[in-house]
Amino acid sequence: MPVTIRRATINDIICMQNANLHNLPENYMIKYYMYHVLSWPEASFVATSTSNVFDDEDTTGQGGAGNEEDCLMFNDPISGNSIKLDPTYVNPGEKLVGYVLVKMNDDPDQQNEEPNGHVTSLSVMRTYRRMGIAEKLMRQALFALREVHDAKYVSLHVRQSNRAALHLYRDTLEFEVLSIEKSYYQDGEDAYAMKKVLKLDELQISNFTHRGSSEEKVEDDLTSDLLEDIVKNGIDNIAV
Ligand SMILES: CC(C)(COP(=O)(O)OP(=O)(O)OC[C@H]1O[C@@H](n2cnc3c(N)ncnc32)[C@H](O)[C@@H]1OP(=O)(O)O)[C@@H](O)C(=O)NCCC(=O)NCCS
């Protein structure tokens, strides 16, 4: 089940909205996704899976996993492929399993503030949770906000009851809680307003690629020659 993290494009928007509708009560119109992706095209990311497992999420909303017979199929006259008309798929065989929707703060009332970013929405489809996907999406987005848009910090809101997201933001990503915003959500629930100062050296993606592995982090060694090492030590003894 290989999962790829890549920048979100305009072609992903329907699938991002679909994932959002599945996972969160805070939903947005398509034009709001377009506004994010077109205004800050480097900042939002999606996670996609190219697994051949047909459909392990219930997209029907009727309980149970969908199966091939339940889905509308469309014969692409150009490629001859059968395409499933399902908003989970960004491309034939490429399913969107998570996204992070991010923007720079462009509030005219905050023009005197340092440049700062905002995480509008994040979610991962249920079957793909607790695999580190949300953390990876967030780290990519925070790095892009800092590197591309020079954001000095990033902010977000999270429901007080959302234990999974709170753990991710506060413990894993080290956001600080700024305040509690009373009745922030439409149903009256309070939100934690959170903030993280963005420092480029701490956000380098290479700092996290070995996280969770029992092996020690291997630093890039730019002085040695890989081919020479393979000849000397054999391919099985080379750490890449
Ligand atoms: C919150 C959410 C995005 C997390 O996605 P995920 O891909 O499962 O998260 P990760 O696997 O990257 O986990 C990141 C950390 O959170 C922890 N975590 C994840 N789910 C958790 C849960 N249900 N309870 C407690 N901790 C949890 C992980 O253990 C991990 O901690 P670690 O760094 O100490 O190992 C996902 O649960 C989701 O989509 N929820 C519904 C939508 C939502 O709430 N979005 C956030 C709105 S603010």
Image (cartoon, rainbow, N blue to C red):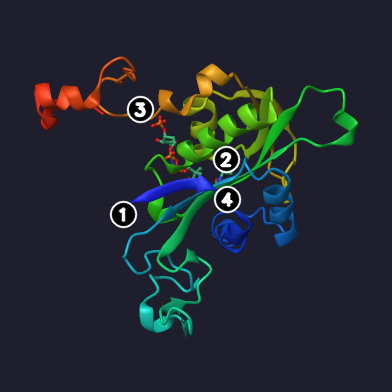
Mark 4 neighbour class, 10 Å CA radius: few under 14, some 14 to 19, many 20 or more: many
Give the residue type at disc 1.
Met
Q: Whole-Å distance between the Cαs marked 3 and 1?
A: 20 Å
Q: Are marks 3 and 1 in contact (CB under 8 Å)?
A: no
Q: Secondary structure at mark 3?
A: loop
**Residue furthest right in the image:** 109
Q: Secondary structure at mark 1?
A: loop
Task: Pinpoint residue 161: horizontal percent, then vertical percent.
Answer: 57, 40
Residue at left offset 38%, top offset 84%: 69
Sequence-first disc among 4 and 3: 4
According to the picture, the residue beneath numbered tag 1 turns out to be: 1
According to the picture, the residue beneath numbered tag 2 turns out to be: 161
Give the residue type at disc 4.
Ala
Residue at left offset 44%, top offset 69%: 92
Give the residue type at disc 2.
Ser
Q: Secondary structure at mark 2?
A: loop
- Mark 4 vs mark 3: give the one in front: 4
